[in-house]
Image (spheres, rainbow, N blue to C red):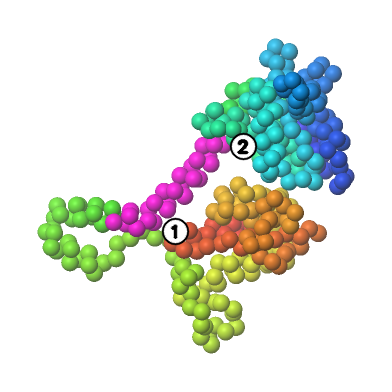
Amino acid sequence: MEKWNELCYILSENLPSNTSEQLFELKVVQAFEKLGWSQFNNEIVVRKSIQLGASNRIVPDLILKSKDKGNLFVVEVKKPSLEINNSTYKGQLSSFMAITRVELGILIGNKLQLFLDGKFFNENGIVLIDEIEFKRDSEKGLKFVQLFSKENYNRENIENHAQEKIQKLKEIEDFKRLKNQLLSKNYNEKIIDYLKTELLKEYNEKTIEKVLKVLDVKIENKNKIVPVENYQKSRTKRYNSVENFNEFTGKLPIGKYVRKTFNELVKNNLIDRNEIERLQRADYSKMTFDIQFPFLAKENSTYYERVRYWKNPYQINGEIFYVTSQWYEVPANNDRPYYEEWLKKMKE
């Protein structure tokens, strides 16, 4: 873990806020030398100009190589003040990987992203297999050191790591797809047909039909929420003291609930810096809340769109953030259980 913590110091903690891309590139070279690679021995090749056709050239930032195996992977460096979740940067890295004929690429800026050639997953282009923030004592950071130290470097180990990551993402997507399938009207009809078939072994069809007419057979979320569109616009005096209080469930609508509880977390300093960083990631927000946009976004973020974030920002650790407004609680798409589970963890 000490080696990863040292990389965090070099690539994040000890950098001035206005670090240029050129200076950061030198720091990245220093970091790989800490992992055993040597620029002196031509294992780290900096800004090698590669001829393309008669008049064009490309210049990858770094190429890591060995004497016996040639090019191993490429590294594209971006200024730390930039958000690297950018399709342009991914496209650049993909081009460099193709030209240098390597299957692995690393994008380094305000965090570190690992990409592998899509052929390993029957996909086109390159595939993001991991994203690592520069935070001390990170298990993902420790894994990076283990995989990319010169003495341990082995492409097969990286491929196995990638397969594990992709499998986890697939399991998450399969869970959501199956859940939506079971909640669908079409599957509800299949359940009833199955019940009829089983019941016919003991009862006649006429009796079964009569019973099913007085019963409601269906699968639904354990946390049953009245859909947003069904909330009554008019409120009784009983709930006038709480704006838009839901008379049917005794709960605030999901949007107001998120704003109210998140404000309490911020006010009581219950969210650490690591979590603030994670909440700005689209993949983490999808996995944690089942939402389509990062939970938090800065105004200059590539994800920020005024129509998808509430207009009133939060000030956290001296920085301004906006919270996504894209929350739903309908039978086929209920974000409340995900948010409540996360909220519980933040309060522990």
Q: Which residue is most to the front?
A: 54
Horizontal side, residue 346 vs residue 196: left or right: right
Give the Cα separation between the discs numbered 2 and 1.
28 Å
Q: Would you name the residue on which mark 2 appears?
A: 128
Q: What number is the disc on residue 119?
A: none
Query: Where are the magenta residues, as a range?
Result: 161-189
Residue 340 visible, this angle: no
Q: Which residue is most to the top?
A: 68
Name the amino acid, label 2: Leu
At label 2, counting other C-alpha atoms closer than 10 Å, the crowd grade (few under 14, some 14-19, many 20 or more) is some
At label 1, counting other C-alpha atoms closer than 10 Å, the crowd grade (few under 14, some 14-19, many 20 or more) is some
Instruction: Residue at 66% x, 41% y: name it.
Output: 87
Q: Would you name the residue on which mark 1 appears?
A: 332
Quadrant showing the N terminus: top right
Horizontal side, residue 288 vs residue 151: left or right: left
The residue closer to the viewer here, 294 or 311, is 311
Name the amino acid, label 1: Ala
239 vs 153: above or below: below
| Image coordinates for residue 105, horizontal then vertical, percent | 67, 30
